Image (spheres, helix red, strand yellow):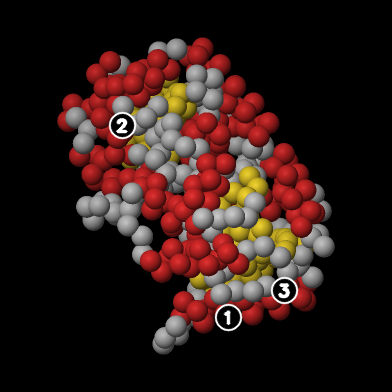
Amino acid sequence: MHLGFLTPEYPHEKLGHSAGLGTSIKNMVGALVKNEVKATIFVYGQQIDEIFKDGDVVVHSIKKRKYKIGGWYLHRKFIQRYVNKVVLLKKINAIEAPDWTGITAFMKFKCPLVIRFNGSDSYFCKIEGRKQKKKNFYFEKLALQGADYLLSVSEFTAQETRKIFDLKKEIQVIPNSIDINVFAPDESIKVEPFKMLYFGTIIRKKGVLEIPEIFNRVANQIPNAEIYFAGGDVVDIKTGNSTCQLMMSAFDESHKSKVHYLGKLPYGEIKKEIQSSAVIILPSYAEALPMTWIEAMAMEKALVTSNVGWAEEVMVDGETGYTVNPRNHQEYADRIIELLNDESLRQQMGKAARIKVEERFSNMVVAKKNIDFYRNIVK
């Protein structure tokens, strides 16, 4: 079986910036290849045209074309022609694309098209209460209507997307996955008993602007507590200011020496920060399936997360950590304080979290679900 993946991002030094979507595709494809499935990646919107190999995976970097008028349509048709040539030449059995921006609107492929919900613009606008551009909704709806099959990384995202676009087709749920051998506890790195860590983009929708009020309450009870942030800063959508600066200004002056911003770090460094932390806090308001949660759980860390929508599909409140409404600053702080004060409880929850990931989100477990799905649709 040979599968193609159309995507705006994929983590490789020859390509542009890649975030969670690219990482999830790389994790999935790596597991598929180990199960003797061929994979070809089509990465659009790049600086140059180039074909290269990433291990056993063939990657097509597709340069973004410019047009005087109608670029939104003409570029899609260019991508369609490019991909179809490879589909026929290399006998690709199916193409998978994301729901984000409805890239496959106006496209028709020479094989079945699968769209996987990792969170469309329409989905995130609804969750965040933001106004959406009408053309974005139109493109995404048209793309979903044109897909032969629909997948979602979580049941919550599936049902919300169904309601947004009034979808009638069946939506199968297969979560994203991680390599549990890459994300695993490392006993050679000492845990700092009062260290808290947030990692991920510094952006409003991730709940970071709730953290100062939460930490102020924690630090009032535990003076040794410190908090670290690892992730890229972005311009805040509501104020136009740096989200990091907005966040930092909200910490009490007496606690600011305990707050550390590390900036954007490579994966290897982030793993060290996770390992050395006592508690991971991830109070996100908007996700499809949060990879940061799963990565920290795989490293046997106790988490305090949000309790929104998808949370119960990843976390078990009181077992793998705690799920709390981030706006309830006192309860969120109380849960952190409880974990900081109880090493045994942290270890117990961390081990339960690792087991959860092994059973539901490991590459090999999820790869089998993806292979079974594609075998059923490939004629």
Q: Nearer the viewer, residue 246 or 142?
A: 142
Residue at 76% in and 44% down: 368
- Marks 1 and 2, the one that precedes in the sequence: 1
Q: Is 171 left or right of 131, judged from the image as shown?
A: right
Q: CA distance from mark 1 to mark 3?
A: 14 Å
Q: Where is residue 74 drawn, in percent x and y?
A: 51, 82
Q: Amino acid at mark 1?
A: Phe
Q: Which residue is mark 1?
A: 78
Residue at 64% in and 74% down: 108
Q: Quadrant of residue 208?
A: top left
Q: Is 305 left or right of 182, judged from the image as shown?
A: left
The answer to whether residue 180 is visible is no
Q: Which residue is mark 3?
A: 110
User: Is disc 1 in contact with disc 3, using a CB cutoff of under 8 Å?
Assistant: no
Q: Amino acid at mark 3?
A: Lys
The correct choice, above or below, for 339 with respect to 251 in the image is above
Q: Quick one: quadrant of the C terminus?
A: bottom right
Q: Which mark is residue 200?
A: none
Crowd rating for badge 2 (residues with CA inside 10 Å; few <14, some 14–19, many 20+): some
Q: Which residue is mark 2?
A: 327
Circle 3 sits in a helix, a strand or a loop, which is it?
loop
